[in-house]
Amino acid sequence: MAHKIAPSVLSCDFANIQRDVEMINDGNADWFHIDIMDGSFVPNISFGFPVMKAIHKHAKKPLDVHLMIDNPDQYIQDFKDAGAEILTVHYEACTHLHRTIQAIKAAGMKAGVAINPHTPVEVLENVIEDIDLALIMSVNPGFGGQKFIKNAIWKVEQLSNLIHKRGSHALIEVDGGVNADNAGDLIKAGADVLVAGSFVFNSENPNATIDKLKAL
Ligand SMILES: O=C(CO)[C@H](O)[C@H](O)COP(=O)(O)O
């Protein structure tokens, strides 16, 4: 399966959201990556439901929503109503992770679990057959534009082995500092979905940059 590119809307021009969403609609990106930050789980606040609904209104591609929030269970139905197709929670933010995954699926969404750079891949062993997506963070979550942590490549390899061993259908997504210098190694290691924020939106021609990442 060819890898997917999910531009992170966090790096778009928020004064021109509709323009940027339509630009992504017109290009070859696969998903919109939506970063929700609560100022508690991570030291930053991004945006909430009104902005997400505005993006959903114009988006012609699935919304891949990454929750960097405490107590995600509280908001599962709200994210479904705001247009999430894939809803990813952090392993580190969930006390009853299996229950949270079931609740996401029961609400009619695909379920993802993200792990921080210091969290070992093994924590996914007991849910790998239940999830649709596993997200390896390649920066500490909270901000766009950070430097890629190389250890993520090794974690992708480990996760790919685990997925094959267990016959899971989970996709491997990588998020943080992704660019043309590391994307090839990530794909070779087994990544299925690359999130890219600043590399795409800070470039002169974002859709040409997406094509460059897709061609690797
Ligand atoms: O989850 C995130 C930050 O927590 C962002 O999706 C990520 O940082 C993407 O931005 P960039 O490609 O600029 O690193």
Image (cartoon, rainbow, N blue to C red):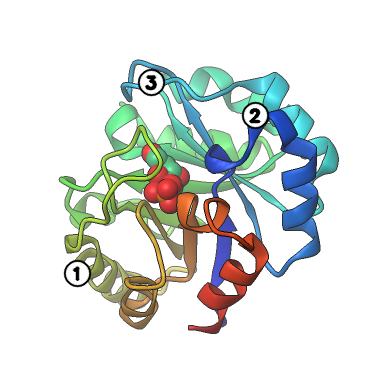
- The type of residue carrying mark 1 is Trp
- The type of residue carrying mark 3 is Asp
Query: Mark 1 CB in 8 Å range of ligand 1?
Result: no
Q: Residue at x 65, y 56 (%)?
A: 31
- The type of residue carrying mark 2 is Phe
Q: Residue 109 location, x and y as percent?
A: 65, 44
Assess disc 2: are there few (<14), some (14-19) or many (≥20) residues with their C-alpha within 10 Å of its C-alpha.
many
Task: Read off the residue under disc 3.
Answer: 70
Q: How far apart are marks 2 and 1 (CA)?
A: 32 Å
Identify the disc placed on residue 90.
none
Task: Read off the residue under disc 2.
Answer: 79
Q: Residue at x 17, y 62 (%)?
A: 151
Which quadrant does the N terminus fall into?
bottom right
Query: Mark 2 CB in 8 Å range of ligand 1?
Result: no
Q: Which of marks 2 and 1 is in front?
A: 1
Query: Which corner quadrant of the figure contains ligand 1?
Result: top left
As drawn, 111 above or below 79? below
Task: Looking at the image, tell me whether mark 2 or mark 1 is earlier in sequence order.
Answer: 2
Q: Which residue is drawn at 39% across and 60% down?
A: 178
Q: Residue at x 33, y 22 (%)?
A: 41
Assess disc 3: are there few (<14), some (14-19) or many (≥20) residues with their C-alpha within 10 Å of its C-alpha.
some
Task: Read off the residue under disc 1.
Answer: 154
Q: Can residue 169 be seen in this view?
A: yes
Q: Nearer the viewer, mark 3 or mark 1?
A: 1
* The image quarter in which residue 183 lies: bottom left
